[in-house]
C-alpha cells in the first residue's frame, strides 16, 4: 500500500503541474464544454486543447485511483485516522473536479477559479499525509509515538505558523493568477514571500537546534529551507521573465511541495507530548473562538457589501475577509492566553485548550501573535491602511482595554462592545477607503446589539463569573435591577438605530419593515427579561439575540440600494 499511495502522490503532483500549465498558457477555455471536450472523449490534441484536455485526463485518473484507494482502505484499514484521511481526500478530489467543470461552464469566474487553485494543493496535502501514514505505520490517532524527542509547544506553534503563512501566500498567488495582477496584491505577495521565508527559516532553525535527534523533523525542515529559497527565486524570476510559462508553472509546483512538507512537519510536531498520538489541531481552532470569529467575518462582509458601489471584486473580498478572520482569531487566542487561569475556575470555560492542559500558554501566545501579525499585514498590504488601522484598534480595545477591565469594573461590557462593533467598519473602509454615516450606523447597531446579548449570557453564568473574579454587571448586581435597566434601554435604543440605514438610503423599504418587526419583537423579549430577571428569561433573550442579528443583516444585504 505504501507504493500505491506514493504513486498517487506522484500522479497528483503531475496533475498540479498540468493545471499550472493550463493557467500559465491561458488554455482554461481552450475546451469550452465539460465534461466532454468538443463533445468527444478524445479531441485532437493540438494547441491549448493539449493542455486543457490533458489536464482533464490526468484528473480523471487521479480521481479514479483515489476512489479505489478509499474503498480499499474502508474495507481493510482499521485505523480510524487513516480512513478519515482517505474520505477527506476523496471528497476533495470530487469537489475539485466539480470546481474545474464550473470554471469552464461559467467562463473562468474569479471566485471559482481561486477556489479551484486553493483546493488542488489541499488535496495534494491529504494524499501526502496518507502516504506518510503507510510509510511510518503510525495512525492519526490512538497509537503510541516513537519519536526520539517530543516537540515543544512553541515549535508546534512555529510549524503551524509556517503552514498558515504558506496558505496565505497560496491565496494571494491564486488571486493574482485568476483575479488580476493589481499592484497592491503584487506588493502584498512579494512582502508575504519575504515574511514567509523568515518564518520557514526560523522554524527550520528551531527544529535543527531543538529536535536534532528526530530525523523525521530535521529532514522536513531541511527540505522546507531549500524549497522556500527556490520558491523565492522562482517568484522573482516569474516577474523578471514576464510570467514565463515554465517558470510560473514551476513556481506553483514548488509552492505545493512546500505546503505538503509543512503539513507533514506539523503533523509530526502535533503528536501529543505524552505519546498518545492525539492530534490537537482542534485545540488551536478552539483558541480562535470560531463562533465569534465567524460573526466578525460575516459583519465585515455586510459592511463591505453595503459600502461597495456594485459587486465586490473577488480579490478585495478575499483579502478583507481573510484579514478580518485572522485578526478575529488572534483576538480570541490572545484573550484566552491572558485569562486562562481565571478560565480554569469557570465551569463554562475550564475545558478550553489552556486550562485543560491541551496547549501551553506560550504556544497560544505565539499562535495569537502570528495570526494577528499576518491579519494586519493582509489588511495593510492587500486592502488599505484604514482597514488595517481598524483591525489594530479591534485588537487593542479587546486585549488592552476590555480584557483587563473585566476584573475591575462592571462597565467592562460597554468597553467590550467596541471591538465587537468594529468589523463592519473594516468592511466599510475596505470598500470606500473612508468612514461616513453609513459605516458608523453599522458600528452603533452592533454596539447596541451586543449589550443585551452579552448581559443575557452573563446573567446565565453569573455564578461562574463571580467565582473567577470577573466583575460583570450580573455578577455584581444581586437584585438584577441594574441589569434589567441596561437590557431594556439598549433594546429600546437599538430599535431606531436599526432603521437609520433606510433613512440614509443605504437600504430600502423592505429592510425598514423587517427591521421594525424584528426590533419590536426583540424589545418585547428584552423588556420581559428585564422584568422577570430569571435565568430562563435571560436564555430566551440570548437565543432571540442570535436570531435577530442574522435576520437583520440578511434583510440589509438583500435590500441594498446601489449608489
Image (cartoon, rainbow, N blue to C red):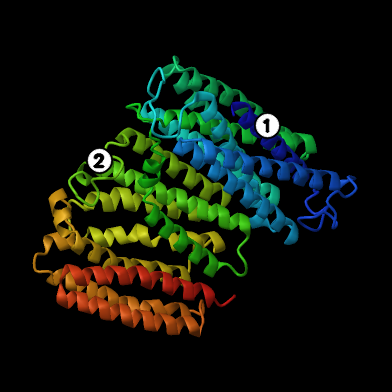
If you read the primary sequence from the N terminus, does the residue marked by circle 2 or circle 1 appear first? 1
Q: Which residue is mark 1?
A: 10
Q: Which residue is mark 2?
A: 355
Secondary-structure class at tag 1: helix
Q: Nearer the viewer, residue 110 or 238?
A: 110
Q: Position of residue 180 (x, y in %)?
A: 70, 52
Residue at position x 68%, y 29% in the image = 233
Instruction: Report if the CB atoms under discs 2 and 1 are less than 8 Å apart.
Output: no
In this view, which residue lies farthest toward the top?
213
Percent coordinates x, y for residue 315 in the rendering: 62, 54
Front position in the image: 140 or 527: 140
Q: Quadrant of residue 415?
A: bottom left
Residue 180 appears in view = no
Q: Is residue 513 left or right of residue 180?
A: left
Quarter of the image with the C terminus in it: bottom right
Q: Secondary structure at mark 2?
A: loop
Residue 127: percent from left, percent from top: 59, 36
Question: For the residues marked 2 and 1, what is the alpha-carbon distance in whole angstroms?
Answer: 43 Å
Q: Quadrant of residue 483?
A: bottom left
Amino acid at each position: 500500500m505504501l507504493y500505491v499511495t506514493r504513486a498517487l502522490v506522484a500522479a497528483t503532483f503531475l496533475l498540479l503541474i498540468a493545471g499550472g500549465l493550463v493557467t500559465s498558457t491561458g488554455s482554461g477555455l481552450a475546451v469550452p464544454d465539460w465534461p466532454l471536450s468538443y463533445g468527444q472523449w478524445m479531441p485532437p490534441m493540438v494547441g491549448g486543447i493539449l493542455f486543457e484536455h490533458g489536464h482533464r485526463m490526468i484528473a480523471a485518473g487521479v480521481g479514479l485511483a483515489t476512489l479505489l484507494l478509499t474503498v480499499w482502505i474502508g474495507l481493510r484499514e482499521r485505523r480510524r485516522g487513516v480512513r478519515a484521511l482517505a474520505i477527506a481526500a476523496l471528497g476533495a478530489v470530487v469537489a475539485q473536479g466539480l470546481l474545474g467543470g464550473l470554471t469552464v461552464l461559467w467562463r473562468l469566474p474569479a471566485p471559482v477559479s481561486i477556489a479551484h487553485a486553493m483546493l488542488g494543493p489541499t488535496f495534494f496535502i491529504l494524499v501526502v499525509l496518507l502516504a506518510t501514514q503507510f510509510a511510518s505505520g503510525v495512525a492519526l490517532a490512538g497509537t503510541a509515538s516513537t519519536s526520539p524527542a517530543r516537540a515543544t509547544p512553541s515549535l508546534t506553534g512555529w510549524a503551524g505558523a509556517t503552514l498558515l503563512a504558506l496558505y496565505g501566500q497560496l491565496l494571494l498567488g491564486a488571486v493574482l493568477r485568476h483575479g488580476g495582477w493589481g499592484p497592491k496584491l503584487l506588493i502584498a505577495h512579494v512582502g508575504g514571500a519575504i515574511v514567509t521565508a523568515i518564518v520557514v527559516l526560523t522554524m527550520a532553525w528551531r527544529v535543527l537546534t531543538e529536535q536534532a535527534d528526530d530525523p523525521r523533523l530535521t529532514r522536513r525542515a531541511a527540505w522546507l529551507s531549500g524549497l522556500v529559497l527556490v520558491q523565492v527565486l522562482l517568484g522573482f524570476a516569474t516577474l523578471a521573465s514576464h510570467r514565463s510559462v515554465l517558470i510560473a508553472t514551476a513556481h506553483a509546483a514548488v509552492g505545493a511541495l512546500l505546503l505538503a512538507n509543512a503539513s507533514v512537519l506539523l503533523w509530526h510536531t502535533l503528536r501529543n507530548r505524552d505519546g498518545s498520538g492525539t492530534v490537537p489541531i482542534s485545540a488551536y481552532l478552539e483558541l480562535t473562538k470560531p463562533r465569534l470569529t465567524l460573526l466578525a467575518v460575516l459583519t465585515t462582509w455586510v459592511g463591505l457589501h453595503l459600502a461597495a458601489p456594485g459587486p465586490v471584486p473577488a480579490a478585495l473580498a478575499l483579502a478583507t475577509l481573510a484579514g478580518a478572520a485572522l485578526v478575529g482569531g488572534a483576538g480570541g487566542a490572545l484573550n484566552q492566553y491572558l485569562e486562562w487561569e481565571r478560565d480554569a475556575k469557570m465551569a463554562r470555560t475550564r475545558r478550553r485548550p489552556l486550562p485543560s492542559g491541551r496547549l501551553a500558554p506560550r504556544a497560544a501566545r505565539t499562535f495569537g501573535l502570528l495570526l494577528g501579525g499576518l491579519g494586519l499585514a493582509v489588511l495593510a498590504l492587500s486592502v488599505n491602511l484604514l482597514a488595517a488601522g481598524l483591525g489594530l484598534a479591534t485588537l487593542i480595545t479587546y486585549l488592552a482595554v476590555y480584557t483587563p477591565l473585566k476584573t475591575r469594573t462592571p462597565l467592562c461590557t460597554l468597553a467590550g462592545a467596541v471591538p465587537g462593533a468594529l468589523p463592519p467598519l473594516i468592511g466599510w473602509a475596505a470598500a470606500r477607503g473612508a468612514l461616513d454615516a453609513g459605516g458608523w450606523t453599522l458600528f452603533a447597531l452592533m454596539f447596541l446589539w451586543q449589550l443585551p446579548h452579552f448581559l443575557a449570557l452573563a446573567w446565565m453564568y453569573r455564578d461562574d463569573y463571580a467565582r473567577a473574579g470577573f466583575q460583570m454587571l450580573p455578577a455584581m448586581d444581586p437584585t438584577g435591577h441594574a441589569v434589567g435597566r441596561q437590557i431594556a434601554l439598549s433594546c429600546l435604543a437599538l430599535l431606531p438605530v436599526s432603521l437609520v440605514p433606510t433613512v440614509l438610503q443605504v437600504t430600502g423599504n423592505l429592510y425598514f419593515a423587517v427591521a421594525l418587526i424584528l426590533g419590536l419583537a426583540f424589545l418585547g423579549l428584552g423588556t420581559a427579561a428585564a422584568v422577570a430577571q430569571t435565568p430562563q428569561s435571560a436564555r430566551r433573550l440570548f437565543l432571540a439575540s442570535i436570531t435577530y442579528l442574522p435576520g437583520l443583516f440578511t434583510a440589509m444585504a438583500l435590500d441594498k440600494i446601489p449608489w
